[in-house]
Image (cartoon, helix red, strand yellow):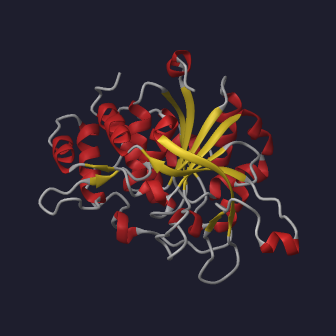
Amino acid sequence: MTTPSDQQQTIPVIIDCDTGVDDALALLLAVRHPRLDLRAVTCVAGNTDVEGVVRNTLTVLERAGAPDVPVARGAERPLIEAVRTARHVHGHDGMGDLGLPAPTRTATAADDDVDAVTLLRREILASPRPVTLIPTAPLTNIALLLRTHPEVTGNIERIVFMGGAVATGNATPVAEFNVWHDPEAAAILLTAGVPITMYGLDVFERVIVPGPDVRRLRASAEPGTRLAGELLAHRGPATDASDPGGGLGDAGAVCAVIDPEGLTTHRLPVEVSLAPGPARGQTLVDRRRRVGESELHEGMREQPLVDVALDVDVARYVKLYLGTVERTEA
């Protein structure tokens, strides 16, 4: 249960992203919500190449009014797989091809060339309160951090990651893009030894901002608010052919950190399918009420328990997002 004192405390967060239309929506929310202290942003290849991710991230932070947030370049490819971008979804530049100007900070000047793993370690260990990590991208940077500097887990409150699916995938019939892009990294994440929330496609695709709200954001004179509207208009999915809404996507994971009571989660065993073939990258979520014949005949296997999001209060998160990016949220 959330107490009034809990609501007043600032939550230190770090976002690891592949900006990305909906990663940009997440950054806008994280910068502008008064309960969040965005300590750093780390970049990884995913929706576009890592250089484009850094450029897009810097652009969004400037538009949001937070140009000085530390930013670092991370992995340019998954641990094993080749890079497989999602430009068909996010546009050639990864930001909907909106023609946004280049940031005044250059990619090479981002945080004095400190790499993502170094920045993650530095900011996690330096935080006076345990940090919440919000990965909205393939989990390569996070896996490298956990394997290189496992001591950081002592100052991580929780990892709330956008990834995985209980039911249907998008990269394949069963695998969600972020996990499919680097399955080994996702498997490493699940062994972090800290509380983990999986904000997967089951809730990701449901939080849609109605068309009239998107139009209002696009008409704003304030740069960050207007950018949110343009990004939502690009994202879809259409809810009304004459006045389409836009999905919050990754921004829903940030909503879940600010207001976890808007999310219904169940603590369930989760593992990632690493074998070659059509199921590679699938998040296997065990929702059975009792063990099955496999366990009875072959024995129990240790599986990490994850708080898996199964339902979301759509109206609550839409209201939270709009009130924050339009600066009306108290």
Quadrant where the C terminus sits is top left
Quadrant where the N terminus sits is top right
In the displayed structure, 263 sits above or below 38; it is below
Q: Position of residue 63 (x, y in %)?
A: 32, 39
In the displayed structure, 128 sits above or below 275; it is above
Image-based side of 246 in relation to 159, left or right: left
Q: Nearer the viewer, residue 58 or 6?
A: 6
Q: Position of residue 114 (x, y in %)?
A: 62, 44
Residue farthest top in this picture: 5
Residue for point 71% across, 55% down = 190
In the displayed structure, 200 sits above or below 105; it is below
Residue for point 52% across, 67% down = 167
Residue 98 visible in the current orientation: no
Q: Position of residue 128 (x, y in %)?
A: 67, 23
Q: Nearer the viewer, residue 52 or 330?
A: 330
Q: Position of residue 152 (x, y in %)?
A: 75, 39
Residue for point 27% across, 45% down = 227
